Image: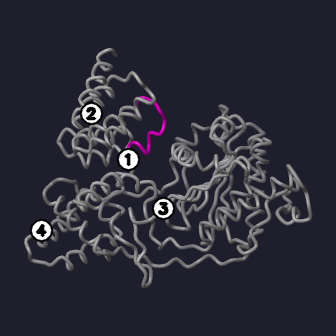
């Protein structure tokens, strides 16, 4: 029973690992490539926008020099919101994207989220998918934008150089805390140690002093990684999921993704567990409004992370999917191995070794990539298709993926929450289903569909009086 419960959990979690696809460490470069883009809320970029573009590009360039980090800055750009969302082409070797929002956009999209700037690293690869977003809008509560930029760049440098996450976040925020105290309370000799000046062609700027231990530090050589099924837990569930796949209960892509989540990573002689046994590869570090409000920032952690993902659709790299012929060959080969194991021709250990080989193949990312490029509507349609076919585990996987793309409280998210609750009912996971119907009713207390679904679910749990109450409420609306 415990295995089935855990496998169901894996099915729900499959969608959560779409945000940061694993990268090959073949893309190893000691030179950090970065680009700065100004986003204009106006119909076009004004002279002031171009002034900002040059200003912040030069500051970024000079600040990275303080860390003695080898880097390559692409020419800066200024784009409108629409141009960015429809025309921006991310350089193939880009490691860091710096987005600068103008005043109107920054106040609406960042200050409304209780932050003046944000740094996100989206991947377990140290060298790729780093993003900084901040606002060109001075505000006493959120600090000077130049200071915020240097703060977020320090997060990036420390993470890029492989420092532990507690240092990446805490040490930089300690400097920020001291800066707040120096500005708002008591200025003493130690205040001069937390800030420094950099000079560009246009002016001199006060920035956060670089973290001393990171100055001149070499970029770490990446370790080779290998997927393995090392523990009893991993092996048992991999075998069970394979049985489900052969019986047609889960699709090819969900089967492979489940194996990826289950497998560990072998680094040298150590096994680093992956998926549900480890932390998410999505690291989010945000700029707190002030240090004494850091707890408030933590409470908004998931909201800010979700907001970022909706605003920055170009962070993960795109790759071409397999051709139909390649996919067919891959699936036939995989299924042949699985059937040989199921028929007793090969033992568990040999079959698990074959699975490890599959997961370490460079074709895996290509095989799964087309799912990552599905639109929100396509994910919903596939989920509904699986639900109608009674394949509830697969439908939940697609609904979860769609929910990561639909973070607002609009009609689409409401529909997805109801769909996921219905799929959970299909698996007799009634208590879990209630959570999703209640989420809808918290936003729309008179939603008749959610009221009916909740009534049905309560009836399945034997709570007849409560079920009757919600049926009556549904009939009124």
Above or below: residue 458 compared with residue 237: above
Label 2: which residue?
458
> Which numbered disc flags the more N-terminal residue, 4 or 1?
4
Q: Report the disc number at residue 339.
A: 4
Q: Are marks 3 and 1 in contact (CB under 8 Å)?
A: no
Circle 3 or circle 2, nearest the eye: 2
Q: Report the disc number at residue 281.
A: 3
Instruction: Measure how far apart labels 3 and 2 are at the Cα level.
Output: 37 Å
Circle 1 or circle 2, nearest the eye: 2
Q: Residues within 10 Å of mark 4 (few under 14, many from 20)?
A: some
Above or below: residue 391 compared with residue 210: above
Give the quarter of the figure containing the N terminus.
bottom left
Query: Residue 183: x and y, percent?
Result: 86, 51
> Total of numbered circles in the picture?
4
Q: Are marks 1 and 2 in contact (CB under 8 Å)?
A: no
Instruction: Measure how far apart labels 3 and 1 are at the Cα level.
Output: 16 Å
Query: Residue 113: x and y, percent?
Result: 62, 40
Label 1: which residue?
401
Query: Residue 320: x and y, percent?
Result: 38, 57
Place residue 439 in its image quadrant.
top left
In reply to whether residue 412 is colored magenta, the answer given is yes
In reply to whether residue 258 is colored magenta, the answer given is no
Would residue 269 appear left or right of 470 to someone viewing this image? Answer: right
> Which numbered disc flags the more N-terminal residue, 3 or 1?
3
> What is the magenta range?
402-413
Above or below: residue 348 compared with residue 33: below
Q: Are marks 3 and 2 in contact (CB under 8 Å)?
A: no
């Amino acid at each position: 029973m415990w295995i089935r419960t855990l496998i169901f959990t894996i099915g729900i979690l499959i969608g959560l690992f779409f945000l940061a696809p694993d990268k090959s460490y073949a893309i190893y470069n000691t030179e950090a490539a970065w680009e700065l883009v100004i986003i204009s809320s106006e119909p076009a970029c004004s002279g002031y926008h171009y002034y900002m573009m040059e200003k912040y590009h030069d500051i970024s360039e000079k600040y990275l020099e303080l860390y003695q980090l080898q880097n390559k800055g692409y020419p800066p750009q200024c784009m409108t919101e629409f141009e960015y969302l429809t025309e921006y082409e991310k350089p193939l070797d880009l490691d860091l994207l710096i987005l600068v929002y103008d005043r109107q956009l920054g106040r609406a999209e960042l200050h409304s989220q209780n932050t003046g700037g944000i740094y996100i690293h989206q991947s377990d690869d140290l060298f790729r998918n780093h993003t900084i977003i901040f606002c060109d809008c001075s505000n006493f509560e959120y600090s000077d934008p130049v200071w915020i930029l240097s703060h977020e760049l320090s997060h990036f440098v420390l993470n890029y150089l492989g420092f532990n996450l507690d240092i990446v976040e805490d040490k930089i925020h300690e400097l920020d805390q001291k800066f707040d105290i120096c500005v708002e309370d008591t200025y003493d000799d130690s205040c001069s140690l937390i800030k420094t000046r950099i000079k560009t062609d246009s002016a001199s700027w006060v920035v956060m002093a670089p973290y001393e231990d990171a100055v001149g530090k070499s970029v770490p050589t990446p370790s080779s990684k290998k997927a393995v099924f090392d523990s009893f837990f991993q092996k048992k569930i991999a075998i069970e999921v394979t049985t489900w796949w052969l019986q047609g209960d889960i699709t090819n892509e969900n089967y492979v993704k489940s194996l990826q989540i289950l497998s560990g990573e072998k680094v040298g002689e150590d096994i680093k567990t992956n998926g549900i046994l480890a932390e998410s590869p999505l690291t989010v570090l945000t700029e707190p409004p002030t240090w004494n409000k850091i707890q408030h920032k933590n409470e908004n952690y998931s909201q800010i992370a979700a907001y970022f993902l909706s605003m920055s659709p170009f962070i993960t790299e795109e790759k071409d999917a397999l051709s139909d012929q390649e996919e067919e060959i891959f699936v036939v080969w995989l299924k042949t191995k699985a059937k040989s194991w199921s028929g007793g021709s090969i033992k568990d250990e040999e079959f698990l070794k074959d699975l490890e080989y599959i997961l370490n193949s460079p074709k895996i990312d290509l095989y799964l990539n087309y799912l990552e490029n599905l639109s929100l509507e396509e994910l919903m349609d596939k989920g509904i298709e699986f639900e109608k076919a009674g394949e509830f585990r697969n439908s939940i996987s697609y609904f979860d993926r769609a929910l990561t793309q639909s973070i607002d409280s609009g009609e689409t998210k409401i529909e997805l929450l109801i769909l996921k609750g219905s799929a959970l009912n299909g698996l007799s996971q009634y208590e879990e289903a209630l959570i999703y119907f209640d989420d809808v009713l918290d936003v729309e207390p008179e939603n008749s569909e959610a009221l009916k679904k909740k009534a049905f679910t309560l009836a399945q749990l034997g709570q007849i009086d409560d079920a009757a109450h919600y049926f009556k409420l549904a009939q009124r609306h």
